Amino acid sequence: MTFHAFLGILSAVITGLTIVKVLQGILRMIHDREQIKVYWVHLFWVGFAIFITNLHFWNIVKQRNVAGDVNIYGVADILWLPMLMYLLAGLLFPKFAGDHSGENRPFDLQDHYYKNHAWFFGIMMVVYLTNAGMLRDIITLNFDSNTLFMLVMALLYGTLAVTRNKWIHMAVPMAMAFGLIVSLFFSSNPSTTEISGTDYRVEQEILAEGFEIPWAIEVIGEDDFLITERMGGLYRYQKGELVKVQGLPNSKTYKTDRHYGGMMDISLHPKFASNQLVYYAYVDEEYHLSVARFELVETTAKDLEIIFVSNQFSAGSRIVWEDENRFFLTFGTGGSPKPDPGPQDVNDPRGKIFRLMADGSIPSDNPVLPGMSQPLGIWSYGHRDPQGLYFDIEDSTLYANEHGPMGGDELNVITKAGNYGWPLFSYGLNYDGTKVSEMTEEEAARHTILPIKYWDPSFRLAPSSLIKLKNSNFENWNNSFLMGGLAYQCLVRYNSETDETEIVLPKAGRIRDIAQLPSGNLVILIDQGTPGWLDKGRVVKLTSNN
């Protein structure tokens, strides 16, 4: 039995037991109508818990590429607010909590009130432990703000479930209420702030917000950008105003621990100034990676043409141009909890980097891969999830960073017909802590191309985006790579000459993309709920004050 199957069965068992609790409450109400005031909230809660647990259970059972239309994280994250209301009601109104002794004894409550805390605690833990990402974060002590907050909430409810100490029952609800008030009035990301480091000073300014997962940004001008929203939609930002681009096909995401796929990269044709052509990668309504191009007329997509359609789902995709005739496209996969063999299969598009003509056709000088008789769209293979892609036009070198499983993130120089090893070899571990394979580094060097840099499980980068700064206003960062660090919610600089990795913008949030402006300043995209759980997805301008 797999670990996921075990947790799925556990979810089903708790669901069944919770249904029994509901029936028990209904019978009590029928027997004694005076109890309706006490049990209606209880019934609401256990019913709501059944709903949440069932959704998560079926999400585990299906395990296929379908849209994660129900956001389990989003639904579960609101559990704590009505729980807090229930606690405060029991504290302020003893009879509400089941004390019918006729005396005003707020902390002498009936057994069912304490048992309810235990039920809530159990259901919260099931919902989150059956989430592979949450479990992985707990094991590795790598918490984002949402995970840490909900874990603390679960532990508080566990404490309330096992103790009847009146001071604890007084302090916990009040602390939770205070935390709610503080979080509503204080954001962790003011619109303008300064962050000082040892040799740099950066000012942050929020240009636009309200996104969920802003995934890619393309700069048209100093105050003119295109921004994709992973959950669907392309937006044009011009001089402080954000307008949705009309005329694009629908996209789909797939939900496990987080949303994947959806609307992904956006890229301007190298001759955009004259032809106004825009290319973008997205997962279509069949859950297959596609690439489309269109002419951008203000905020309307004209003459849209789908130039590439695959037969598989992509977890993440980026586009960069080699020249005005050819572009590269990444096709991300994953491996949870075990690696998928697809990246080594040249008949499977997953875990590959493609090289295509501007019209989506296959270049004649593409490689003929093992077992093939003619060139394919595939330029390199054996990748896991490359979410950063950069082509250096000065030396015609293609770079890609990619996610390892639990650690083992990589930065690679991409070469024609190169096999980059996944899942034959990895510096990371499976999410259950086991080795990805038994292949040694020495063996991998003989059969695959090793990265120019890797980060082992002690530093889980989870890289997103990739850019090499040149002639920017950040003098200390020039000629270094910048990338988002999703795991530690930071901006990371890597100097390939000195092999130095530095967190240059800590606690910034989950940075999805980075772009350099004509002025030499930077813009970055940050997910909602990071680093603070009330923070909105946003576009942030970074200005150097060296």
Image (spheres, helix red, strand yellow):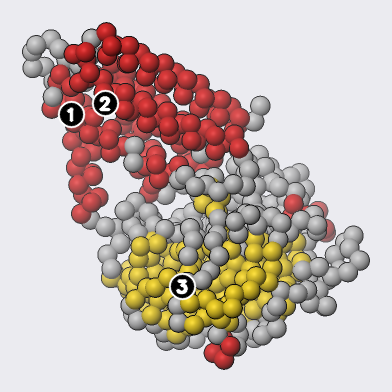
Residue type at the position of mark 2: Val
Q: Quadrant of residue 358?
A: bottom right
User: Which of the numbered marks, if any, corresponds to residue 89?
Assistant: 1
User: Which of the numbered marks, if any, corresponds to residue 245?
Assistant: 3
Q: Is residue 52 visible?
A: yes
Q: Is residue 141 visible?
A: no
Residue reaching furthest top?
A: 31
Label 1 near label 3: C-beta < 8 Å? Answer: no
Nearest to viewer (mark 1 / mark 2): 2
Sequence-earlier tag: 3 or 2 = 2
Label 2 near label 1: C-beta < 8 Å? Answer: yes
User: Which of the numbered marks, if any, corresponds to residue 41?
Assistant: 2
Q: Position of residue 422 (x, y in %)?
A: 72, 54
Which residue lies at the image location 79% right of the left edge and 77% below the top edge?
A: 363
Q: Position of residue 56 (x, y in %)?
A: 50, 36
Q: Position of residue 231 (x, y in %)?
A: 48, 58
Residue type at the position of mark 1: Ala
User: In the image, 177: left or right of 225?
Assistant: left
User: Which of the numbered marks, if any, corresponds to residue 479?
Assistant: none
